[in-house]
Amino acid sequence: MPQIIKSPSIIKAAGTKEKIIQEFFGKVNSQTDEVSIARMKSPQGWVEPGQCPEFNEYTIVLKGTLEVRTKHEMYLVEEGSAILTKKDEWVQYSTPFGGGAEYIAICLPAFSPDIVHRDE
């Protein structure tokens, strides 16, 4: 049976500044374990702690530029492009540029604080 999502749940974000996470599908808003889909709005200067998650994350940048760091490289993901970060690999997201960024994040399996494994 189809499930209509009338509005997202707002999730508290980790990081140096306040970032807005609007979860449409996931453990909180739709009680979905298979996938989480959220719209993120992060301000200029936001930096998330590094993490080594147990999920693949597919990210589509709608506005601005997202900086994505791995142990070996740094990527600038600009408006209209996307990046896939693989599970069990260290990654860190930030929005250091003017205007911040807005993007869609899809996690398979669904995001959970128990499986994100953020740096201390």
Image (spheres, rainbow, N blue to C red):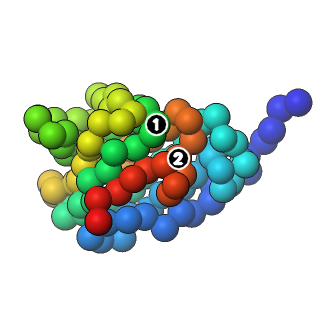
Question: Furthest residue to the right?
Answer: 1
Residue 86 located left or right of residue 11: left
**Residue 46: in sight, yes or no?**
yes
Which residue lies at the image location 49% right of the left edge and 49% below the top edge? 115
Vertical placement of residue 33 versus 93, above or below: above
The residue under label 1 is: 55
Residue 36 lies, with reference to residue 56, above or below; the image says below
Label count reads: 2
Please tell me which residue is depicted at 36% across the width and 36% down the height of the picture: 88
Residue 46 position within the rendered picture, expressed as x and y whole percent measured from the top left: 25, 63
The residue positioned 11% from the left and 35% from the top of the image is 72
| Residue count near mark 1 (Cα–Cα under 10 Å), binned few <14, some 14–19, many ≥20 | many
Q: Residues within 10 Å of mark 2 (few under 14, many from 20)?
A: many
Marks 1,2: beta carbons within 8 A:
yes
Image spot of residue 109 (x, y percent)? 56, 36
Q: Front-most of 90 and 93?
A: 90
Give the labeled residue for mark 2: 111
From the viewer's perspective, is 81 left or right of 105? left
Q: x%, y% of residue 78? A: 22, 36
For residue 39, which numbered disc appears in the image? none
Q: Amino acid at mark 1?
A: Phe
* Image spot of residue 79 (x, y percent): 27, 36
Rendered position, 119 above or below 16: above
The amino acid at mark 2 is Phe
Query: Which quadrant: the N terminus?
Result: top right
Decide which of 19, 79 is in the foreground and name it.
Answer: 19
- Whether residue 72 sits left or right of residue 45 in the image: it is left
Quadrant of res 13? bottom left
Tell me which label, 1 or 2, sits earlier in the chain: 1
